[in-house]
């Protein structure tokens, strides 16, 4: 048996937690949020300290390295390794004790920071450091990197908040590092006392010095603090199993002063001068990072300065004092919490949005967080910009200006030998520049592989040799995260892009935002892991399946990692036929939430459709791909044969329903929806023409999507009622496809055309897209474009009532048919119901419903269409309140497929069902999507309605008899 097999067997015998050596587990851990990639032998999710000790014992016997990993958001590569990865997020993620009186908490390493903040908040407390990844970074990772965050101006780094640690060394020794040499391994004190002069003079004095080992914390004048010295050691000295951390008092109120400056240098020059005012944060951003500076004061760069107080008035007064002290182009002070969160979101998403230049060019970490003395930041940034220009590179600096720490993503070419060579030369010169300004190569995220090779330029060879001796005291066998900090790998080795195919792969979608290159689309995921947030909240959608399962493979990042490894072909070896990728994508709801919520715009729904298209090419598909994927065909057949009532009756017979669901791959727990006895278009033809004088204004074409046509025609009837009341003339799309060109609308009966025409119906192709039947989707969409040509030529707006269909037409259509100019024209013509009223009936006043609302904004509307017009329409109709975010969990065919019911229900229980259950008795339950309405009805017996139905009902009430 080889080392892998013996190692795996030994771990399985010794460990109670999960031990995984399969391709999926290994592929998920090859990368963090850095430029680097290493393939581990296996992954262990320990249940407790005893499990950790067992892992270390087995790995020591096999001479296999161990890497401790938290949320995997490290940007320097230190959360990757070639041995066994310890995943603490699975089990060792608890808040063990909270002591409000003593203002401390005892935590396990896998605890996500936000969970600690939520527990501390009711006591008026918080953990001081708060990286922008606070929704998924773990306390263990924060201690390993000595993380900081925006509030370090007030509360320091993680090391400033650590009181005592519980640590296992690689040789199994259990230590409790603290002050006064508490928990020091044998030999550490002797080492330090022999190097006091070097430790007193060899470390830059600045607030954000994270690089190297913090051996100066062991000086007697610093309290010989072993716990503090351990912080920032990147898992190379010992494995953390518990920590006692300090909490701070949270201000009762906050205000945010946003200060506008001419450019980033002016903002950087001003930042240090604001520190005497006692701000909580002083964050800086330049205009080249903000795509749409909505709500920001005038300027080319901004400082975000947060102040606190016992009351809103006190916080505002302090913010206004900051404004008066600042020499600014423009400024504003914000006290509304919602508005503050919106502004902060610009800053928190920067680590993702910075990965794309305005022209779409990719940008990468590597020099993500250098720090210099705050007073030198302006001068440093001017030199930094000059160095970028000298190397022909671009980047958008931002970060913690109050502490001289700058984040930046740079458009390195890491795909070619020449580009990698320039990356190395630039890195060496930038290291020298940082040192010349008295700075630290890392000011927040640690050195990892990205900067450890350059530490001699900062500290000198003798101090780096001292680091190596300290590492040997703690870990004499070099078992823990080798290659980090001491004896490091080269900064241009192990680059994650090196394993990708050199030539583009053949794909079906156009990927217009990635130059048509699927490799570039997959590279979009840089690992910041916003998709790993455990709770939704607000309007967030991404990532519903991860929030249910908590499994990395069900996050957007995890799926992107598997696709990356599929293209690499090293861990996942069967390409598009991969069962690992298929199984991970199986629980992707295609909600498209990542398209908008992911800071870098990963579109996993499209990637899933692409994968399924290739995976099942020439092979038999799951039954649901035929039964649900061909839904438009089956329902049109039912309409033509007028058998809806018969099928409804048969579906009500239990044995027959069970047989039909089993044959169609439909979940047995699901009820088969009832079909409408009269389709929407049949009603339309019967009521033509419209009542005299109605709809005499601009024409609009109402799209008869499959759901409106066959399953909920009441929505279509209501929309016609409202649109005509608003003065619009409603038409249906053409239904005749002659040899020449389409004619008429849904009621056309031109005799000459009928002689040579064939009947056809428009379709967005949604069901074919969601099941990856992309060849069929193209056929359907090309036919649709043929039918819609006269509508496009006439420039008539197209109203689509079903959000998922509107999203398919607006986003998927032009990406699947990028070479057909009609696709982009139809996409541009598509309007939602609310958008149509706002744009084409702007002077119409809707009826005053005067009721509260509850329900859900459709996930595709959130991700692709936007809901501004809907919110405005609800407000003008006196419909008060907000709709929940998230995904209903039914998501078209997903929730109906066999094996998905429990996940589907759990997704609904995340946000949708709680919001509806908490609604007042007179609330109007709104859900524009057919799936959302069906999910509510089947899981809770609540009947939700489309906004058009609510408005039409009110119009009928107000109509004089």
Image: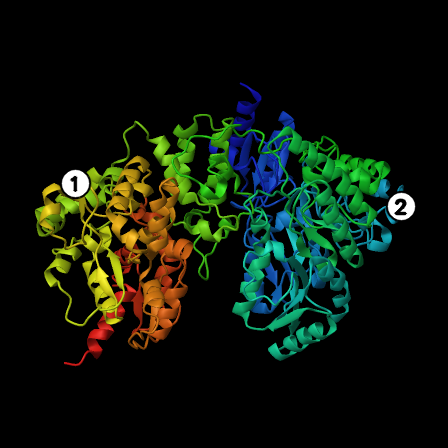
Helix, strand or loop status at disc 2: helix
Image coordinates for residue 420, horizontal then vertical, percent: 66, 33
Report the quarter where the C terminus lies: bottom left
Rendered image: mark on residue 659? 1
Q: Is residue 624 above or below residue 909?
A: above
Image coordinates for residue 289, horizontal then vertical, percent: 60, 54
Rendered image: mark on residue 803? none
Image coordinates for residue 672, horizontal then vertical, percent: 20, 50
Q: Quadrant of residue 783?
A: top left
Q: Quadrant of residue 843?
A: bottom left
Q: Residues within 10 Å of mark 2 (few under 14, many from 20)?
A: some
Helix, strand or loop status at disc 1: helix
Cα distance between the residues tagged 1 and 2:
80 Å
Q: Is residue 133 left or right of residue 671?
A: right
Which residue is under mark 2?
196
Indicate which disc, 1 or 2, sits on the residue closer to the N terminus: 2
Q: Is residue 630 above or below residue 268?
A: above
């Amino acid at each position: 048996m080889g080392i892998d097999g013996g190692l795996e067997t030994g771990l399985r015998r010794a460990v109670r937690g999960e031990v995984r050596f399969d391709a999926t587990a290994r592929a998920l851990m090859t990368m963090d949020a850095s430029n680097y990639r290493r393939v581990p032998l296996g992954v262990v999710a320990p249940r407790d300290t005893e499990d950790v000790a067992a892992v270390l014992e087995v790995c020591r016997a096999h001479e296999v390295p161990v890497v401790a990993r938290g949320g995997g958001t490290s940007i320097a590569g230190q959360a990757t390794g070639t041995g066994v990865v310890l995943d603490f997020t699975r089990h060792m993620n608890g808040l063990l004790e909270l002591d409000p009186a003593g203002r401390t908490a005892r935590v396990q390493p896998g605890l996500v920071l936000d969970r600690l903040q939520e527990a501390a908040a009711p006591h008026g407390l918080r953990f001081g450091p708060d990286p922008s990844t606070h929704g998924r970074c773990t306390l263990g990772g924060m201690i390993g990197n000595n993380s900081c965050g925006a509030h370090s101006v007030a509360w320091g780094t993680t090391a400033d908040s650590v009181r005592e640690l519980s640590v296992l060394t690689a040789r199994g020794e259990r230590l409790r590092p603290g002050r006064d040499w508490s928990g020091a391994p044998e030999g550490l004190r002797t080492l330090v006392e022999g190097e006091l002069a070097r430790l007193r003079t060899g470390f830059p004095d600045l607030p954000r010095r994270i690089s190297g080992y913090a051996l100066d914390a062991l000086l007697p004048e610093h309290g010989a603090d072993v716990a503090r010295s351990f912080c920032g050691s990147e898992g190379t000295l010992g494995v953390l199993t518990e920590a006692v951390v300090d909490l701070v008092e949270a201000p009762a109120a906050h205000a945010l002063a946003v200060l506008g400056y001419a450019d980033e240098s002016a903002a950087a020059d001003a930042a240090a001068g604001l520190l005497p005012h006692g701000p909580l944060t002083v964050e800086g951003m330049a205009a080249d990072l903000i795509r749409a500076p909505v709500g920001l004061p005038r300027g080319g760069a901004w400082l975000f300065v947060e102040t606190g107080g016992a009351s809103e008035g006190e916080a505002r007064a302090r913010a206004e004092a900051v404004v008066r002290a600042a020499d600014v182009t423009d400024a504003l002070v914000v006290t509304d919490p919602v508005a503050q969160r919106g502004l902060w979101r610009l800053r928190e998403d920067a680590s993702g949005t910075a990965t794309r230049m305005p022209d779409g060019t990719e940008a990468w970490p590597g020099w993500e967080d250098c720090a210099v003395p705050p007073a030198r930041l302006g001068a440093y940034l001017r030199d930094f910009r000059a160095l970028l220009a000298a190397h022909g590179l671009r980047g958008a600096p931002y970060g913690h200006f109050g502490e001289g720490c700058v984040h930046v993503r740079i458009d390195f070419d890491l795909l070619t030998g020449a580009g990698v060579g320039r990356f190395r030369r630039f890195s060496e010169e930038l290291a020298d520049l940082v040192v010349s300004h008295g700075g630290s190569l890392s000011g927040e995220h640690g050195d990892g592989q990205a900067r450890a090779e350059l530490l001699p330029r900062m500290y000198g060879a003798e101090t780096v040799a001292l680091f190596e001796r300290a590492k040997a005291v703690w870990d004499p066998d070099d078992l823990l995260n080798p290659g980090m900090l001491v004896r490091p790998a080269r900064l241009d080795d192990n680059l994650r892009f090196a394993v990708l195919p050199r030539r583009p792969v053949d794909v079906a979608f156009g990927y217009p935002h990635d130059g048509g290159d699927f490799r570039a689309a997959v590279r979009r995921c840089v690992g910041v892991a916003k998709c790993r947030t455990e709770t939704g909240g607000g309007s967030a959608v991404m990532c519903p399946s991860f929030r249910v399962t908590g499994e990395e493979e069900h996050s957007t990042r995890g799926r992107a990692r598997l696709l990356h490894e599929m293209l690499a072909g090293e861990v996942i070896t069967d390409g598009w036929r991969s069962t690992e990728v298929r199984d991970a994508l199986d629980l992707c709801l295609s909600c498209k939430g990542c398209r908008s919520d992911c800071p870098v715009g990963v579109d996993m729904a499209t990637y899933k459709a692409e994968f399924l298209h290739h995976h099942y090419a020439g092979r038999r598909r799951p039954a649901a791909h035929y039964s649900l994927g061909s839904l438009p065909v089956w329902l049109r057949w039912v309409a033509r044969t007028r058998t809806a009532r018969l099928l409804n009756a048969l579906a009500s017979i239990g044995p027959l329903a069970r047989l039909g669901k089993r044959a169609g791959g439909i979940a047995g727990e699901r009820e088969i929806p009832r079909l409408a006895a009269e389709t929407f278009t049949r009603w339309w033809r019967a009521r033509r023409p419209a009542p005299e004088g109605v709809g005499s204004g601009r024409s609009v074409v109402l799209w008869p999507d499959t759901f409106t046509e066959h399953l909920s025609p009441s929505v279509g009837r209501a929309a016609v009622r409202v649109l005509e009341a608003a003065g619009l003339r409603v038409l249906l799309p053409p239904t005749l496809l002659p040899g020449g060109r389409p004619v008429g609308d849904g009621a056309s009966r031109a005799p000459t055309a009928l002689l040579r025409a064939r009947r056809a119906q428009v379709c967005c192709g949604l069901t074919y897209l969601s099941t990856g039947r992309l060849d069929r989707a193209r056929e359907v969409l090309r036919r649709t474009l043929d039918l819609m040509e006269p509508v496009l030529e006439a420039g008539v707006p197209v109203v689509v009532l079903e959000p998922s269909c509107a999203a398919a037409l607006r986003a998927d259509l032009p990406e699947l048919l990028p070479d057909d100019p009609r696709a982009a024209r139809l996409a541009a013509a598509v309007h939602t119901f609310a958008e149509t009223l706002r744009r084409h009936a702007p002077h119409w006043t809707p009826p005053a419903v005067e009721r509260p609302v509850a329900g859900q904004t459709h996930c595709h509307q959130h991700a692709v269409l936007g809901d501004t017009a809907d919110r405005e329409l609800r407000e003008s109709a006196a419909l008060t309140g907000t709709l929940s975010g998230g995904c209903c969990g039914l998501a078209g065919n997903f929730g109906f497929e066999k094996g998905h019911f429990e996940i589907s229900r759990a997704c609904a229980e995340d946000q949708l069902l709680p919001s509806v259950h908490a609604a007042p008795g007179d609330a109007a339950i709104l859900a524009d999507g057919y799936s959302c309405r069906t999910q509510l009805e089947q899981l809770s017996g609540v009947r939700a309605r489309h906004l058009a139905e609510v408005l039409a009902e009110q119009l009928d009430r107000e109509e004089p008899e």
